[in-house]
Amino acid sequence: MSTPGAGRRGRQAEAARNDLRLLEAAHEVFTTQGFDAPVSAIARRAGVGMGSLYRRYRTKEELLQRLCVIAMERVVSAAEDGLAHPEPWEGLVHYVRTCVGFGSGALAPVAGTIEVTEEMGATFRRASETADRLVGRAREAGVLRDDVTALDISLLIEQFSRPAPGPPSERHRPIKRRLLTIALDGLRAPGATPLPDDPPDLDWYEGRWRTGT
């Protein structure tokens, strides 16, 4: 005989597992098939019915908003892990590699097409503040070139988060690691070539997420 509440906990656990499958499937479908992919493709990949999907996320926009929050929460975690590293440079490298590894910038193409929720805004601010601290520590230690900003690094991560053209291939992974190592060396102080133009500013970056712009 089950104990009181065990059935409810079981249903909640199953719902949580379904939600995780949906989110993982959504990220995979959107980043490989494009953001106009039908939600039915997400349900099929997750192995759940359309009813389960729509009970959790009424619209594709809600699903994308949730994915954005999760991505930014993982950025916060990666930056905090980087700050915990005793070596400022290695902490920064850990942050960049971790963010590229889970594709933190893969959702950037939806900027301006979905409404930014309060949760998205709050999580973005946490991610920005933590990354600023990490980058500032590396700069103060003299291991990061002075003309590189936290936003430069975020945009670099965004570039490396994009899927390679053509069908998925394991060959892409070592190539990305190689190119990312080259890019990371370019961030090291003192820097051989002065960076051209002014650095990107936060107003421009946030402006990309305003709908209708």
Image: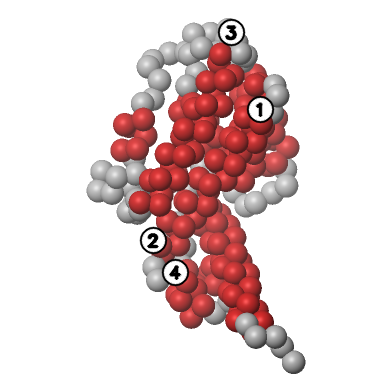
Mark 4 falls on what kind of element?
loop
Comes first in the chain, label 3 or label 1: 1
Which three-letter amino acid code belongs to the residue tagged 2? Glu
Comes first in the chain, label 1 or label 2: 2
Q: Is residue 151 above or below residue 62?
A: above
| Tag nearer the camera, 1 or 4 | 1
Q: Is residue 151 above or below residue 60?
A: above
Is disc 2 surrounded by few (<14), some (14 to 19) or many (20+) residues within 10 Å?
A: some
What residue does disc 4 label?
57
Residue 109 location (% of width, % of height)? 43, 46
Is disc 1 surrounded by few (<14), some (14 to 19) or many (20+) residues within 10 Å?
A: many
What residue does disc 2 label?
61
Residue 55 location (% of width, % of height)? 46, 76
Comes first in the chain, label 3 or label 2: 2
Check the image and tell me how it is coloured: secondary structure
Question: Is 145 on the left-hand or right-hand side of 180?
Answer: left
What residue does disc 3 label?
190
For the residues labelled 2 and 4, the Cα–Cα distance comes to: 8 Å
Residue at point 70%, 85% (across, down): 3
Is disc 3 surrounded by few (<14), some (14 to 19) or many (20+) residues within 10 Å?
A: some
The circle drawn on residue 197 is: none
| Tag nearer the camera, 1 or 2 | 1
What residue does disc 1 label?
91
- Choose top left, top right, bottom left or bottom right for residue 95: top right
